Image (cartoon, coloured by chain):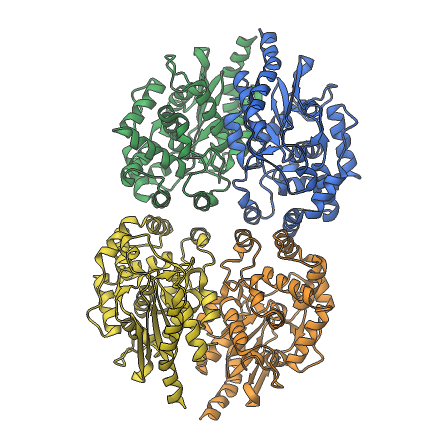
Chain colours: A blue, B green, C yellow, D orange
Amino acid sequence: MMYLRRMSYTSSLLPIYNQIAAQQASGKVADYIPELAKISPDKFGAHLEMLNGSGSQSVGDSHEKFSIQSIAKVFSLSLAYQLLDGKLWERVDVEPSGTPFNSLIQLELENGLPRNPFINAGAIVICDILSGLLDNPAEAMLRFIRDLSGNDSICYNIRVAASERGEGYRNLALANFIRSYGNIENDLDQVLDFYFLLCSVEMNCVELAQSMLYLARGGKNHLGQTILTPSQAKRINAIMLTCGFYDEAGEFAYRVGLPGKSGVGGGIVAVKPEEYAIAVWSPLLNEKGNSCRGMAFLEEFTSVTKSSIF
Amino acid sequence: MMYLRRMSYTSSLLPIYNQIAAQQASGKVADYIPELAKISPDKFGAHLEMLNGSGSQSVGDSHEKFSIQSIAKVFSLSLAYQLLDGKLWERVDVEPSGTPFNSLIQLELENGLPRNPFINAGAIVICDILSGLLDNPAEAMLRFIRDLSGNDSICYNIRVAASERGEGYRNLALANFIRSYGNIENDLDQVLDFYFLLCSVEMNCVELAQSMLYLARGGKNHLGQTILTPSQAKRINAIMLTCGFYDEAGEFAYRVGLPGKSGVGGGIVAVKPEEYAIAVWSPLLNEKGNSCRGMAFLEEFTSVTKSSIF
Amino acid sequence: MMYLRRMSYTSSLLPIYNQIAAQQASGKVADYIPELAKISPDKFGAHLEMLNGSGSQSVGDSHEKFSIQSIAKVFSLSLAYQLLDGKLWERVDVEPSGTPFNSLIQLELENGLPRNPFINAGAIVICDILSGLLDNPAEAMLRFIRDLSGNDSICYNIRVAASERGEGYRNLALANFIRSYGNIENDLDQVLDFYFLLCSVEMNCVELAQSMLYLARGGKNHLGQTILTPSQAKRINAIMLTCGFYDEAGEFAYRVGLPGKSGVGGGIVAVKPEEYAIAVWSPLLNEKGNSCRGMAFLEEFTSVTKSSIF
Amino acid sequence: MMYLRRMSYTSSLLPIYNQIAAQQASGKVADYIPELAKISPDKFGAHLEMLNGSGSQSVGDSHEKFSIQSIAKVFSLSLAYQLLDGKLWERVDVEPSGTPFNSLIQLELENGLPRNPFINAGAIVICDILSGLLDNPAEAMLRFIRDLSGNDSICYNIRVAASERGEGYRNLALANFIRSYGNIENDLDQVLDFYFLLCSVEMNCVELAQSMLYLARGGKNHLGQTILTPSQAKRINAIMLTCGFYDEAGEFAYRVGLPGKSGVGGGIVAVKPEEYAIAVWSPLLNEKGNSCRGMAFLEEFTSVTKSSIF
């Protein structure tokens, strides 16, 4: 029966995809840098990867690379957590952040301690931590991602990184604000270079789902190597669930019911512990910055497969 | 094996209880009203109730009633959700609220729509909704709770309610602020009377765990009657996970990994979908208002039993 | 030359009035209660009263009564200052408040101490202070205003007060919030009744200018009686200058250069120490809640007469 | 009588100085950079300069140079106002800012338009404006200050500027935040270099009082040349009164009653229009960042000489 049920996971992908693809699409493509703005709004793909090779399924544009943007913050958090374990939380908290509006005010009230590793402030601090621990953090980071996905073709997109860096005054403001509290320790320009490289990683849905499988597998990668301890993997899942969707984490937990992370490139990845990882991509974003079709797809998927963690 | 694993759930309770009871207790008892302040700080009990009668276990002061306070907001939310289904979300949102500090500012920014049903603002709006739908909301609410727990001895504590009502200027401020946006429709004094009664419910750990079992059972009570649809039950679990612990929801998800709800009386209830409900009580609170021993107990419990949802 | 200069004050009124009356009027009448909404937008009048009977001049609708609204907060502050002197500042501060948006957040940050006596929070605390010091504060307040103006016909407008009271949920929220910090000591309903009565006072421009003359006269009324000490009068002028125009105090100081106070009824009163008091009324308000024509009139007046205090 | 009265101004200086010097000093020296921290806390001096050479008086350390810090923002504002007149206000507002706490949140709510030219955000925008209008803004600025004071020995302190620049992460955050809204147009590093140079100007009390006399003289300098129009000079006085003392502008207006500006070097300058300029220096600051003895001195001075503008 377990086998049958898992089959139903993979077989459910195409009908859901067709149903949503047939609907009038809403939302708009991120346009704050030319590299993101020029993506076709019609792109739409998904990939499901079951644990332990027990199945997988691709639909639509699942083999086309896109900018994973903030989804990469799961990788940087994982690497920092692997290196520092619990000491990490002296530099960044694990609480949801309320409205984006509050990001600066909360940094001020909380003396430069970002609320969580997924808001920009927290992700910049994670990049600072990695910069202090690693000789070449950008290279080590890419190595880490490639190892997770088992795919050496994964790259940064230097043009995207440079474009965001060039206009990244808000992040420069954030970083300097944090530094004024002493919570950035390395050269700020290099930390930000790294941060923008990190966000420029390009992957397709297949690579993304496969690379995130360690979070469904108690921290082990596809070779059985320990990336994170089971406890650490659970905790990253918990942080994804409470903080992974900007100011829409509650909505995602409520509608989809899986730990996940989204990016303004239109990607969303989600994890069902001990069962699967799933990635979906459609660049049309709602006003909170999350993929409209991506959320609809995942909501339908966990509903049909009854695989919400709740 | 499933049987053995469940045995390990119940058998794990006493060792964890003994271990935590032996540690130096930190935290302090809520003292803003005399009725709460006079509780002995040494009280400590827990009760685990497995699904479908497959086991249960009590430790410590598990049969002593205490003021469940904000935990009752799960019951009021459930009743309102049963009555209104999705229309409920026109009156209250499902997002975490960030710092308590922000409650008023966020209400202002979001035009009187409370962030979620568990912050005071949201719980007051839920009471207003019930006041508009029910002839005698306080009576109907108590009926609902008694039916869930199968225990007709459950009561409001009028003295606690009156005491909180008498000093409840913050809540009066909140309620009037919300009313200025038109999001309170009934007589405000009656709505607040009901709100404070709701928070004064007294239960012991056994009753609390048993009454919450419908959220582990896909919305069905112990008689198999549908209180909520499976989808509704999942969604309440999702809201508990993201919003159930004041400004410590992320910490609880991170450390314990279960949907749950706490109250300043020192109670915490948590739910493992399709497996169990567990209640723990110790009145010593941390600075965020959550029971210190309660959180430690549940962290140890999900760790030992490997039953985090993540 | 002094004589001539003063003549030029009074003689300047009519040309300025005609010039502004001829311009297209912008702004809109306050409409949150019916009693204010029904005022004709064309009303426009002004009255200048020189010190020591050295001249006066009326133009337009200067003899028609209007609702002075927040201008009355100058009278309540004066009475409280007369009674308590410096001890008053233990209950309310003297700093500008920034955006209206911040009123609640600042109350929270500053533990219930309102920023100044002219924001609603501060004026409510002043009403509470007077309620604690006087047997019948509303009656004593009216006596005080009548004595200042030498006019026993000045009255509250019960209908306006009742109408604002009935919809005053924001002020009820503010008052309860302050009370939660212990900075309201008397029965809150009675304090708010008094507050709304205070704001309902009706005066015409002549009465308003004459009644404010004590602030130009070092605290003495028209009979030479000491209402406030010279130091106290100066200080109220300073508070009017920094806090008298909601979030437009800087703009008024910048453009007009006189201590003054406005109300949403469209009135503005301003004081040139040791020279004159001037009142102007036009109910068309800008988006900050200050009379458009009133500000334009006073800007032109201090420019022509070179009587800015700067 | 006019003569006698003016004599009383100058003759009052020494007794007030002695009285305050004899009191136990409170406050603490700014210590965020070594150059400020090493100043002796005992320094205390003042200088009064009457208009039109009708008298002057120096007391204490009035001839010792100190870092005027934010007082220099009056000079940069004056130069920008001279060059742009009213168009200046498209880039910066004239309203008090409420608590320092709100600086970033208000920038966010008001889309990068600083509240006034004296908060750091506003002063940085002024430096950006001057950088766009002048080939060598730092040189032109110094020329402007030297001309006002008639003293070519006035200099920047490069060491102070470099020290503040090196630690100026908050200002870097502010500047980048403003730039993200497009309200900084020139190279940000150069703008900040200029800003920190500006704040490093060193003057003594005599020079400071003399150089500010143009604001008491309707905009004309000691040679009778028009620096600002009379209207512009009045308006800068108005801005000093409402915004010149960080979050203590209301307190200064209330206690002293003159337009003025303070700096964390311990200097305060104040202006009585058409009468005098006065500078006082004591490096011991209160918690709001204003000189304790400076404020006490000026309060006593305007009280004794009855020269509050109110």
Up the image or down, B241 lies above or below D162; here it is above
Up the image or down, D246 lies above or below B230; here it is below
Up the image or down, B239 lies above or below B149; here it is below
Q: Position of residue A249 (x, y in %)?
A: 54, 33
Q: Residue furthest top?
A: A1
Asked whether the viewer can see residue C264, the reply is: yes
Asked whether the viewer can see residue C259, the reply is: no
Q: Quadrant of the N terminus of chain A?
A: top right
In the rendered image, which quarter is residue D174 located in? bottom right
Q: Which residue is found at the position 55% from the left and 64% from the top?
A: D89
Decide which of A47, A244 is in the foreground and name it: A47
Q: Which residue is found at the position 51% from the left and 26% from the top?
A: A255
Decide which of A89, A35 is in the foreground and name it: A35
Is B171 positioned to the left or the right of A238 in the image? left
Q: Position of residue C226 (x, y in %)?
A: 29, 77
Q: Which residue is found at the position 47% from the left and 35% from the top?
A: B290
Q: Position of residue D210 (x, y in %)?
A: 60, 81
Q: Residue furthest left?
A: C152
Up the image or down, A257 lies above or below B183; here it is above
Is A171 positioned to the left or the right of B87 in the image? right
Q: Position of residue B19 (x, y in %)?
A: 53, 25
Decide which of B240, C111 is in the foreground and name it: B240
Is D150 positioned to the left or the right of A302 in the image? right
Total marks placed = 0
